[in-house]
Image: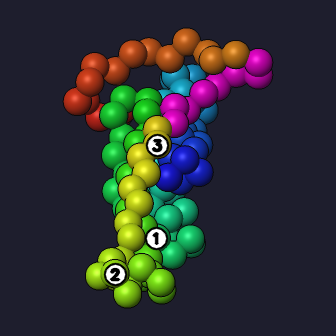
Amino acid sequence: AEQAARAGADALARDDAQRGGPLRLDSAAARAAAERYLATTGHSGTATVLGQTVTVSVTVTRKTAILSAFGIDDLSATSTASARGLTGIDHEEDLTPIPAGKDSR
């Protein structure tokens, strides 16, 4: 989940920045990048973008070998991680805040 969130947080709306606008996440590209990363690992999950933050949740279920003798056939683990798109060389650049629940565009 962590690396998928990081992959999504790298999806900046570069066109806006090239026109002199602020650097912001491209919400659709961020979700797609996170989901693409999960697909390459063979997992599925959900990716959401809220403001400048990408949050990814993934659940992994595995069959058990020894525990199945005690009626435990599967074990599941869920992980949720978030990452923010950062700009600048050695510190986070001031990004215009986007109110919660609003798209980053």
Task: Locate residue 8 relative to residue 91 in the image: left or right.
Answer: left
Residue 88 included in the magenta stretch of the image? yes
Residue 7 shows up from this direction: no
Tell me the magenta residue range: 83-90
Residue type, numbered disc 3: Ala
Frontmost of labels 2 and 3 is 2
Task: Locate residue 11 relative to residue 32 in the image: left or right.
Answer: right
Is 36 or 20 nearer to us in this picture?
A: 36
Residue 70 shows up from this direction: yes
N-terminal of the pair, mark 3 or mark 1, is 1
Q: Residue at x 39, y 16 (%)?
A: 97
Residue type, numbered disc 2: Phe
Q: Pinpoint residue 14: horizontal percent, then vertical percent.
A: 57, 39
Residue type, numbered disc 1: His
Q: Would you say the residues marked 2 and 1 are in contact, meaning their CB atoms lie under 8 Å apart?
A: no
Q: Residue at x 23, y 30 (%)?
A: 101
Mark 3 is surrounded, within 10 Å at the Cα level, by few (under 14), some (14 to 19) or many (20 or more) other residues, namely some
N-terminal of the pair, mark 2 or mark 3, is 2
N-terminal of the pair, mark 2 or mark 1, is 1
Task: Report how far apart the C-alphas of labels 3 and 1 lie in the structure.
Answer: 15 Å
In the picture of the structure, the residue carrying the numbered disc 2 is: 70
In the picture of the structure, the residue carrying the numbered disc 1 is: 43
Is 36 or 69 nearer to us in this picture?
A: 69
Q: Pinpoint residue 22: horizontal percent, then vertical percent.
A: 52, 22
- Give the vertical position of 84 relative to 41 (above or below): above
In the picture of the structure, the residue carrying the numbered disc 3 is: 81
Q: Secondary structure at mark 2?
A: helix
